[in-house]
Amino acid sequence: MSYVDNNLKKADKFYKLKEFDKANDFYNLILSKFPKNQRALKGINLIKNLKSDSNSNSDNELYYLKELISLYDQQKYIEIIEKLDYFISKVTLKRHFIYNLVGVIYFKMGRILKAVTNLKRSIRHYPENHEAYFNLGNVLAKKNKLSLAIKMYKKAIGIKPYYDKACNNLGIALKKDGQLIESINVLKKTIKINPEYFSPYNNLGKIYFEIGNYKNSINNFKKCIEIYTNSHLDLLHLNLNDNLQRYPLLSEMLTNLSISELANGDFIKGWKNYRARHKYYNPLKIRKNTLIKTEQGLGDQVLFSRFLRGLDFKNNNYYFPVDEKLKKIFSASFPLIKFISHDEKPNVESSFYLGDLAENFIKKHQDLTIWNKKYLNVCDNTTEIYRQRHSKNKIKCGISWLSKSTKENSSKDYYTELKNNMSINLLELREVLELSNIEFIDLQYTNTKKEREYLSKNFNINVKKYDDIDNFNDIHKLSCLIQSCDIILTIPNITAHLAGSLGKKTYLILPNQNGVFWYWKVYDDKFIWYDTFNRFNKNEFINTYAI
């Protein structure tokens, strides 16, 4: 292709896209060597005429676009949707902008198909619209269409190579897709593009945590916080509550940092940052009448309840509005504490969160040796009744394999995501479930009927389920059932916490990634939070010799 034809082709491409300045550049390149080239001269004249005609039109369109943006800023989304045809009839040059904006609105409203339709319209009107590709990537990522989302982010970056937000979200999508190395590389590139953008540091911190590189995880979380707040970590703690209110994302960021520090065994710094998890820190001050505030999940409440034994009961009264599911077993285990309902309002002089007790007792790994023994009690009579219902000549193994939040509206932050990303398929345990000398008893607090029926029908494997025991709502009876078993096989969930607190011999199936929550960490081949635990890795073959 000749020099003239090649540049004319490029000029025509930008002319069709209505990017007239870029088209002009290529026409002028031709005229710099061939001043009398008629096609280039014609193209420049056409653009001049279009620009003069469009100046008056663009002024009118600008008026309607300003009206549209004003409605968007006021979050009047329904009014924008109702007036969509009106705005489209008034705007010609920037229709892609309107469709892109409407796509974002539908996405915010959770109407995914409408969002996709309008974002695709935006791209058809203006194929070089990097924002529409970016927003379409966000929609697809939300629906877990990761390969398509990755493709859209790459399209946006191809149009705008230094698009830091698209690079960051591409890194997130790659992480979710299991492409951790590629995700790290993309996020590092994002930081080079914009070193003052805090989000890629946060996402790098999460990835390094998952691969067990806690040092890099901690460093990236710290950098994220310093950029976000424009302040050093120690200064933020001087007025922690004020700063938690001033910076809405700080609570989650500090919690992420604390998770890595605690997993790394840096308990002093970890507990300090862990204070931020509830978005408000109550200093641990104990008065004659003190309220103990609950933690987010049932598992955390069981985990931290061990420290209730370290309270001063001689001079103080303690009130604890514990979850109703735990009230009976906690009352039996800690009789000196007054367990109340969440509706009760006792007259107290001070309060603190249950999890903040750990800061007083655990400064290093060795401190846990006096705290990792059995500390919960259940009814012996009920336990014996369940024991009599089991097979007589087999090892009784309680089993739990699914994890989900038991709190209906629990936040979907990284802290919750880590705890919920532990489940396995029951078929992965088939080699163990086929052992004839073991009776497996369902401890799961979700409906497992279909899975159990499938195993029974296809593999003649029977997992016993006691339908008269409500594993979800009656934690005391579930605990008695756990106590009646000889051994427990479970993933990290509430069942694991109960088994450990009851001192049961437990085999814990950990996820594939190296990074796990700090209380499931192993030091010197031993679990430090529960001394009766043994471990399996999720990707290891669970063989018949394990139990």
Image: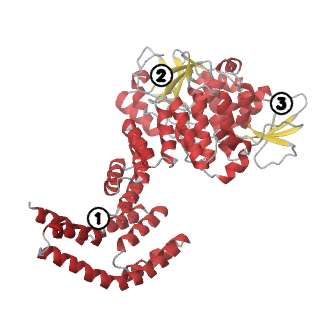
Mark sitting earlier along the chain (3/2): 3
CA–CA distance in space, label 3 to label 1: 70 Å
User: Where is residue 164 shown, x and y percent of the image?
Assistant: 42, 52
| Numbered label attached to residue 127 | 1
Quadrant of residue 48 within the rendered picture: bottom left
- What residue sits 40% from the left and 59% below the top? 135
Which quadrant of the rendered structure holds the N terminus? bottom left
CA–CA distance in space, label 1 to label 2: 51 Å
Q: Secondary structure at mark 1?
A: loop
Q: Residues within 10 Å of mark 1 (few under 14, many from 20)?
A: some
Asked whether, in this view, residue 396 is left or right of residue 360, the answer is left
User: Where is residue 194 shown, x and y percent of the image?
Assistant: 46, 49
Residue 469, visible in the rendered structure: no
Q: Amino acid at mark 2?
A: Phe
Mark 3 lies on residue? 336
Q: Secondary structure at mark 3?
A: loop
User: Where is residue 47 shown, x and y percent of the image?
Assistant: 25, 78
Q: Is residue 441 above or below residue 197?
A: above
Mark sitting earlier along the chain (1/2): 1
Q: Residues within 10 Å of mark 3 (few under 14, many from 20)?
A: some
- Comparing 444 with 138, the one in front is 138
Determine contact: label 3, label 1, CB under 8 Å. Answer: no
Q: Is residue 114 above or below residue 533?
A: below
CA–CA distance in space, label 3 to label 2: 38 Å
Q: Amino acid at mark 1?
A: Pro
| Numbered label attached to residue 115 | none
- Comparing 62 with 132, the one in front is 62
Mark 2 lies on residue? 536
Observer-side mark, 3 or 2, equals 2
